[in-house]
Image (spheres, rainbow, N blue to C red):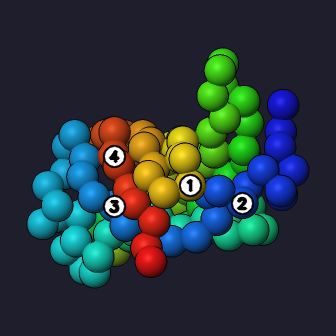
Amino acid sequence: MKKNAKSRNKYIGKWELLDSDVWSKDWIDLSCVGFIEFTNKGDGQFQLGALRAWLEYVVENHGEHERAEFCWVGVCEGDDHSGRGWVETDGIHMTGHLYIYGGDNSKFSAEKFC
């Protein structure tokens, strides 16, 4: 079941990527402080290492949990990439999983920028 914009509120904002199963913090912050950002319009962006990407998301129930599921397109060192992912949050801390089609996938955690 899709949620309306009101349910998106706890996801909206810019989140600092803190760690990952696959990528080191040094690589996450290669170009700038790594982040993922969600807007109130159902879109957003992220920067992870050299990968710059734009996303669209929906908030849905997933079993007992609510989460934002997204698809994305981006560019890394001149090459096009795409994928999908999901995040869950309590409004302060975020956990999720990012999938790069034909490449890596990793769990990650993030914290809301002040």
- Provide the residue designation for mark 1: 91
* Nearest-to-viewer mark from 2 and 3: 2
Seen in the picture, residue 110 relative to 112 is either above or below; the reply is above
**Residue 43 makes an appearance in the image:** yes
Q: Secondary structure at mark 2?
A: loop
Q: Secondary structure at mark 4?
A: strand
The residue positioned 75% from the left and 68% from the top of the image is 40
The residue positioned 33% from the left and 46% from the top of the image is 108
Q: Nearer the viewer, residue 56 or 59?
A: 59
Whole-angstrom CA distance, mark 2 to mark 3, is 19 Å
Whole-angstrom CA distance, mark 2 to mark 4, is 21 Å
Residue 27 locus on image (x, y percent) = 16, 64
**Residue 45 makes an appearance in the image:** no
Q: Are marks 2 and 4 in contact (CB under 8 Å)?
A: no
Density class for disc 1 (Cα within 10 Å; few <14, some 14-19, many ≥20) is few
Q: Secondary structure at mark 1?
A: loop
Q: Are marks 2 and 3 in contact (CB under 8 Å)?
A: no
Residue 107 locus on image (x, y percent) = 34, 39
Whole-angstrom CA distance, mark 3 to mark 4, is 7 Å
Residue 106 appears in which quarter of the rendering? top left
Residue 91 locus on image (x, y percent) = 56, 55
Left or right of 30 on screen, residue 2: right
Q: Are marks 4 and 1 in contact (CB under 8 Å)?
A: no
Density class for disc 2 (Cα within 10 Å; few <14, some 14-19, many ≥20) is few
- Provide the residue designation for mark 4: 108
Left or right of 104 on screen, residue 66: right
Q: Earlier in the sequence, mark 3 or mark 1?
A: 3
The residue positioned 68% from the left and 70% from the top of the image is 39
The amino acid pointed to by label 4 is: Phe
